[in-house]
Image (cartoon, helix red, strand yellow):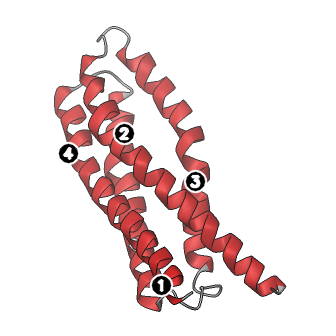
Amino acid sequence: MNNIDITIRLIFLAHVAATLYMTGLIWFVQIVHYPLLAATGRAEFSAYEKRHMSLTTWVVMPPMLVEIATAVLLFWFRPADVASWQVWSGVILLAIIWLSTAFLQVPCHEKLANGFDADIQQRLVSTNWIRTIAWTLRGLLVLGMIWNIWAVT
């Protein structure tokens, strides 16, 4: 095995790990975490939300950055048995995720940091389905990539 093969494997494995991690995490956030925001005490809510935003960054930003970096690198370092449409589809889904995060979820969190608002909290839960579905599709996509690789060998 040469250095190119090792590089391709490492990029691919990092991509799969980051995607599957984020897929599991988004389902937890969608089903448990965001709905429970409504049960947080109103007096403590603003401080809770600000702390939530700060701590969540440490949990989601590293794998999100690994995921997007490796998704782009797969254009150049794509395993032979992974189709280019799979790489393109993954990047398109990531664009949807990042745009949804920036323009839908982050503004909701910023408003909630000023105090609880049931309408904003519900908007956060409902718009987060965009990311939940997109990451679920990404998870299935990387599993399909793995299938392609295993099916050939």
The kind of residue on which mark 1 rests is: Ala
- Image quarter where the N terminus lies is bottom right
Residue 29 picture quarter? top left
As helix, strand or loop, the secondary structure at mark 1 comes to helix
For residue 52, which numbered disc appears in the image?
none
Disc 3 to disc 2, how far (Cα)? 16 Å
The kind of residue on which mark 3 rests is: Pro
* Disc 2 residue crowd, few under 14, some 14–19, many 20+, Cα 10 Å: few
Residue plotted at (26% across, 41% down):
124
Q: Position of residue 150 (x, y in %)?
A: 52, 80
Q: Position of residue 5 (x, y in %)?
A: 74, 84
Residue identifier under label 1: 151
The kind of residue on which mark 4 rests is: Ser
Residue identifier under label 2: 28
Residue 130 as seen in the image, left or right of residue 84: left
For residue 63, which numbered disc appears in the image?
3
Disc 4 to disc 3, how far (Cα)? 23 Å
As helix, strand or loop, the secondary structure at mark 4 comes to helix
As helix, strand or loop, the secondary structure at mark 3 comes to helix
